[in-house]
Image: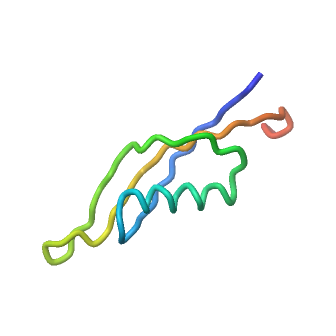
Amino acid sequence: MTIAKNIEISSTSEKSFEDAVQSGIERISKTVKNVQGAWVKEQKVGVTDGKISKYHVIMIVSFVINDDSDLS
């Protein structure tokens, strides 16, 4: 049986929403094995002097647990 877990992460970029998503996935993949997908739950922008200064995303990241020993 396959078991999947979801975790919520946030990521910020000064370039774009796409870059914020990519950076978040790259970072979480360094510490969590078997990342299978992500759902962008929320997007926000930071504004400085009337211009977008930061792109912020909150994502739900799914990863698969293949071994019962991973649950402990």
Residue 65 x, y percent position in the rendering: 74, 36
Along the line of sight, the residue nearer the viewer: 72 or 66: 66
- Quarter of the image with the N terminus is top right
Name which quarter of the figure residue 2 lies in. Answer: top right
Residue 22 x, y percent position in the rendering: 50, 58
Figure check: 25 above or below 54: above
For this orientation, the residue located farthest to the right is 69
Residue 45 x, y percent position in the rendering: 27, 61
For this orientation, the residue located farthest to the top is 1
Q: Residue drawn at (42%, 44%), measured in percent from left and top?
A: 40
For this orientation, the residue located farthest to the bottom is 49
Figure check: 23 above or below 36: below
Identify the image's colour scheme: rainbow, by chain, secondary structure or one colour.
rainbow
Along the line of sight, the residue nearer the viewer: 36 or 1: 36
Query: How many numbered tags mark residues here?
Result: 0
Q: Is residue 72 left or right of residue 53?
A: right
- Quarter of the image with the C terminus is top right
Figure check: 29 above or below 60: below
Along the line of sight, the residue nearer the viewer: 71 or 52: 52
Q: Residue drawn at (86%, 37%), measured in percent from left and top?
A: 69
Q: Residue drawn at (23%, 69%), measured in percent from left and top?
A: 52
Q: Residue drawn at (40%, 57%), measured in percent from left and top?
A: 18
Along the line of sight, the residue nearer the viewer: 22 or 2: 22
Q: Is residue 6 left or right of residue 15?
A: right
Q: Is residue 63 left or right of residue 14?
A: right
For this orientation, the residue located farthest to the left is 50
Name which quarter of the figure residue 15 lies in. Answer: bottom left
Residue 70 x, y percent position in the rendering: 81, 40
